[in-house]
Image: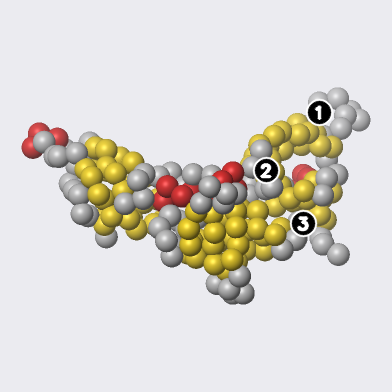
Amino acid sequence: MAALIDVINFKRKLFFEFENTPFVCLDKDISTPTARGGQTLVRIKMRNLLTNAVSEKTFKAGEKFKEPDLDTVPAAYLYSDADASYFLDQQSFETLSLSAAQVGDALDLLLEGAIVQIEKSNGNPIGLEMPMHVELVVTEAEPTVRNDAGGGVTKAAKLETGAEIRVPMFVKAGDKIKVITETREFHSRV
């Protein structure tokens, strides 16, 4: 039997099951009444892990939820077509597929063979978790103007995946850089 979690104890990034669907808590706000006998309410901003839809719902303090049957497995990105993106499970060596909605814009930073974490619910793939950083080669970068060498100045650069990000002025085409996947910002040169 899965453990029950009281809604008052929810934290950011906590997974829970609501109406037989896995969700992740994005934010929590507790409203404590000033009148005697008033019910404490907990407003949860949550994301459905199956549809990626974000919603807000208010629960009474004391309501309990099950932990969902979630599993995360390492997988290598293989390719994408019009139907889905395909990954090779590094433990079972089976091919897993995710729809475009489940992958989102992660393909902008994925190269063939890149290792990601595939999230599974009841054994079925439902989403992916990118590594914190990815290393990609800059294919195009605006030329540096001598007067622009000061700190904090950035320019547009195109990466080998086709994604465009802002990079410091010293980065040039052919450089391999580290990109923060969550914010899509330049981290460092490799």
Report the mark closest to the observer, 2 or 3: 2
- The CA distance from mark 2 to mark 1 is 34 Å
Hey, what amino acid is under mark 3? Glu
What residue lies at 25% left-to-right and 49% top-to-bottom?
139
Residue furthest front as drawn: 82
Q: Secondary structure at mark 3?
A: loop
Q: Looking at the image, is 33 positioned above or below residue 62?
A: above
Q: Which mark is residue 67?
A: 3
Q: Nearer the viewer, residue 27 or 155?
A: 155
Instruction: Please give the residue where the numbered disc 1 appears in the rendered image.
Output: 33
What residue appears at the point 86 percent right and 32 percent down from the top-left corner?
39
Q: In terms of sequence position, does the residue under pointer 3 or pointer 1 come before the other?
A: 1
Which of label 3 and label 1 is nearer to you? 3
* Residue sitting at x 76%, y 34%: 57
Q: Name the residue type under label 2.
A: Thr
Q: Is label 2 in contact with label 3 (beta carbons under 8 Å)?
A: no
Helix, strand or loop at mark 2: loop
* Residue 57 as seen in the image, left or right of residue 173: right
Q: CA distance from mark 2 to mark 3?
A: 18 Å
Q: In the image, what residue type sits under mark 1?
A: Pro
- Label tally: 3
Question: Visible in this render: residue 149?
Answer: no
Q: Is residue 65 left or right of residue 84?
A: right
